[in-house]
Amino acid sequence: MVGVGFEPSAAERNKMGLPFGPMTVPWTLGEFCHWFGAETGLWIDVAPWRVADASPPKCATLLILDNRVIVRYDPRRSVRHRVQQIMHEFGHVLCDHVGDNRFAIGPGLFTTGLDPEKIAAVVQRHDLDGEHEIQAEILGTQLALMCTEVTQLGISEGRLLPARVMDAGRMRRVRALTPLWTALTDAAPEVRLCDLEALSTPAFAEHRMQVEIEDAIVALAPYLRPPADGRAESWVWSISDATARRSVGNVITTVVSAPAWPTDEGRVLAIAKAWTQFQGTSHSSMLR
Ligand SMILES: [Zn+2]
């Protein structure tokens, strides 16, 4: 089974079981999984966690079991974030991080009936706090940027544009995202892969900012009161309040549910623009 969240197309299914040979970029996630399985002889099983809308955020997890590579991801995140979660886990496999089995196996992680003795390794996507996590996130980012699911974001349907036009659009979006990304990753530095100067290309910068903004919102969840109306201006207030609360450890709740952060990147951009405007106005008028 490959990708309940990313069902392979009929053409991809026809190729199942056959070696792909070299792939051309961009590929779909389904094509990548089939290629990976064909090249390695491993059974690839990528599917979402079964989670209720309001249940706590769930880390993506990689499980190596006999000759199976099992990846589970949180389906409540945006398309870009889901691809990043999945490719991060493949990054661990490609970097050969999975041999030491140093990760604790907690109850409830697996479906019942699985024999823990057969599990070779478990890796969960957590903070970017160790060498392996950073390596997997860098490789995962490069792989995600080669996926059709990510390259098509921000492009109107069916429109083929020259690379320089695409990059100009990405640069505009990066400029719009920068103030919000900076504030959120200052508040939750454990989600930041690298500094602004190291975000080398527009595609890389846009991807990291969108992914890290989403990760930071999850990190801030215990301090965050998501707005009931979902308006961009209301999110600005919620984020401002949450960053202030986190800086002094003033939690709102210890029973954290996944924040209702928009999965539509256009809405994230609107929040980022409202944030920039907010920075330009008097804080006292907003935070009365
Ligand atoms: Zn990881």
Image (tube, rainbow, N blue to C red):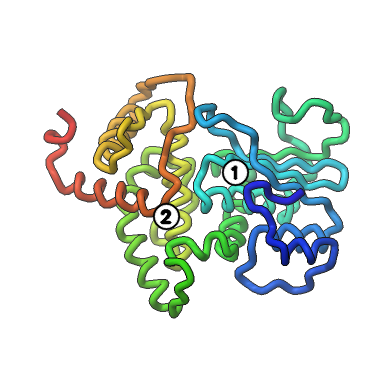
Q: Quadrant of residue 172?
A: bottom left
Q: Residue at x 33, y 54 (%)?
A: 178
Specify few, some or many for label 1: CA neighbours under 10 Å numbering under 14, 14-19, or 20 or more.
few
Can the viewer see residue 131?
A: no
Residue neighbourhood size for the residue with mark 2, other residues' Cα within 10 Å, grouped as few (<14), some (14–19), many (≥20) = few
**Residue found at x 60% / y 37%:** 59
Disc 2 element: loop
Q: Tell me the amino acid under the disc marked 2.
A: Asp
Amino acid, disc 1: Gly
Question: Residue 169, position in %: x, y?
Answer: 36, 68
| Residue that appears at 44% across and 33% down | 259
Q: Which mark is residue 130?
A: 1
Mark 1 close to ligand 1, CB under 8 Å: no
- Where in the image, quadrant-wise, is ligand 1 located? top right
Quarter holding the C terminus is top left
Question: Is 23 above or below relative to 13?
Answer: below
Which residue is more in the foreground, 82 or 5? 5
In x, y percent, where is residue 173? 35, 61
Q: Is residue 17 above or below residue 58?
A: below
**Would you say 216 lies left or right of 116 here?**
left
Could you say where residue 42 lies in the image, as x and y percent from the top left? 84, 53
- Specify the quadrant of the image occupied by residue 115: top right
Residue wearing tag 2: 195
SS category of the residue bearing label 1: loop
